[in-house]
Image: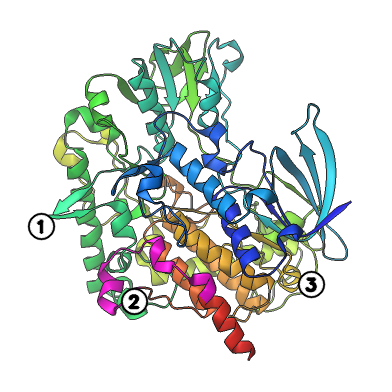
Amino acid sequence: MEHFDIVIVGAGLHGLTIARTLVNASLTRPQRLIILDEGRSIGGTWAAERLYSGLKTNNVVGSYEFSDFPTKPGRYGLKPGQHIPGLVVHRYLTDFASYFGLDKLVRHQVRVEVASLQENGTWELDYKDFSEDRPQTRKLTCDKLVIATGLTSEARMPTFPGSSNFLGPLFHAKGLHEHLQDLKGCEEMIVVGGNKSAWDVCYSVAMTGARAHMVIRPSGGGPSWVWRPMYLFGAKFTLARLSSTRLFCWFDPGPFGSSFSSVRRFLHGTILGMWIAWAFWAALDFFAATATGYGDPQLRMLRPWTSTFWMGNSLSIHNYETDWLELVRKGRIVVHHADVTLLEETTVRLSDGSSLKADAVACCTGWKCMPPIIFKPEGIAEEIGLPREVTSHQQSTGKASQDGFNQFEDKTASDEPVAQGQRDRDIRSRVHSQIIMRFTQLGFSPKRILPRDCKSQRDWSLGLKPHSSTPLALDPGETPYQLYRFLVPPSPRFLRLRNIAFIGMHRSIHAVIVAQAQALWITAFFDRRLLVELEPGVVYHETIWHAEYERLRRPRESGGSGASFPDLVFDSIPYTDLLLEDLGLRTMRKRNLWANIVQPHLPADYKGLLEEWLAKSRERVS
């Protein structure tokens, strides 16, 4: 049986980032590391087989590139300020892998199905190899395992009554590329969802001459905020620019990092500061709505239901060749607020009583947040910190410690599953109270304004306060990823073994900046060179604290994903600061204090991060 020092599952942005970091840090020899990927080509989300016409990044040139491997405009035909086409991203990632020799480490068309922890602390992986005519079941072992499958590997496909009777294609947006031939000649297409993927699919359909019906369920988060550049006093502001500038990050009540903590305490811990922060978000609502043109009565069904304060990464950047909203005005895209209740042969029935002719149905309904891997032995997934339901208080037969997290025994989750659930409930309840005392606005659910609630245009005003008067209660059924620093299991056993890590189990518009910091943190964790002391009780408490904060910060009511995994926007740079502080590295990456405050942060600002860490590590050893 083959054995490797390190196995990385996933050859997308995050898989390539961690592979390059591990090899360059000399944590392993290249021949002792392997990358397993289910795709036929490098790129993950940007693999060639997943691309479709018109697909682009939300990022512009210079903000979606590795710090030491810039996207040279001459090589890729890009212009400053341009959103990067999917084909270019795929080519760029392929070039990156080739330049650093990572392409030789990848095995394509391999699906890891089971990861079993062995008694000696190694992993045994069961996988299927689809590269041959007949799929072959194989095994290998490794000392350390990195899950880099991200959150867009396994589609969440809803089931509809009557779907077996529907005659046209019914598929998830992930499979759009595969169904392009089937969609030729379609006149009417139903697109379920209101997120970025739904916007992209509707645009692709409408540009072929067909009509797209965007169906958004009323119980969800509503239409995504669509961002166009905003202009103020002659200056151009984009969402990427705002959310990577520390001056504006201060207005986000993030708990990450220590940079400018006194400013953030003032803005979110005093009455005057909170009013100033609320004014910022109200102004951002106004300017974003004005730039997009939500005041147009023809666009009333696309107006977001909650403030930009709650906005997560379901947002949409207007990166289309032509005006997307003009297609709505022309009737090429029609928006419905309803649930799909029934599929018939050529008809889709909605909960508002309407019936729509349909030649095809595309579901932009998100992704399963669990890794597509079964972890064994039984119960270990809970110990690792993967999403699960918390055991109810009534079922508990164990007694939690007085501190709730300071007393641990080195046992698997299957040894004491009920007590584990009890401990989670006790700590989450305590942490929930701590968070809403520190960040008052997070104790209330988002203020939602739907078109049906508006009698006039004036009624569509989100107001100064982004929240309602309804308390946002602790929901024991929502248990997001519980990974320390969103990266590693917090249990004492895995803190001792240091044999597994997860990278990219979050969403962020600043994907590359975060990915590079995460990769370096995991490398230091594996090599026991973090500066932070991993005391089990403290680690577990901080893990629950950050997970519960994310759940409150990006709730489902606003279309956020915090109940499942970290959903980072204005808190991306502070989170990166937190990781760099654990590594003993500079968080202020620009030439002076003023630049660090008012200028946006780009991947280029983090150039030389790995070399800086290696140099500091050598200094500490000597």
| C-beta proximity under 8 Å, tags 1 and 2 | no
Q: Amino acid at mark 3?
A: Asp
Indicate left or right for 569 with 516 as reference.
Answer: left
**Residue at mark 1 to residue at mark 3: CA–CA distance:** 60 Å
Q: Amino acid at mark 2?
A: Arg
Q: Amino acid at mark 1?
A: Phe
Residue 68 against residue 364 in the figure, above or below: below
Reading the image, the residue beneath label 3 is 410
Q: Which residues are magenta?
A: 590-611
Answer few, some or many: residues within 10 Å of disc 2's Cα (few below 14, many 20 plus, some between 14 and 19): some
Q: Residue furthest front?
A: 74
- The numbered mark, 2 or 3, whose residue comes first in the sequence reads 2
**Residue at mark 1 to residue at mark 2: CA–CA distance:** 29 Å
Classify mark 3: helix, strand or loop.
Answer: loop
Mark 1 or 3: in front is: 1
Residue 350 image point, x, y percent: 43, 20
The quarter of the displayed image where residue 254 is located: bottom left
| C-beta proximity under 8 Å, tags 1 and 3 | no
Residue 283 against residue 39 in the figure, above or below: below
Answer few, some or many: residues within 10 Å of disc 1's Cα (few below 14, many 20 plus, some between 14 and 19): few
The quarter of the displayed image where residue 320 is located: top left
The front one of 556 and 155 is: 155
Classify mark 2: helix, strand or loop.
Answer: helix
Residue 544 image point, x, y percent: 57, 66
The front one of 572 and 421 is: 572
Residue 499 image point, x, y percent: 74, 65
Residue 432 against residue 360 in the figure, above or below: below
The quarter of the displayed image where residue 134 is located: top right
The dot on residue 265 is: 2
Reading the image, the residue beneath label 1 is 233
Indicate left or right for 125 with 584 as reference.
Answer: right
User: Is residue 10 one of those drawn in magenta?
Assistant: no
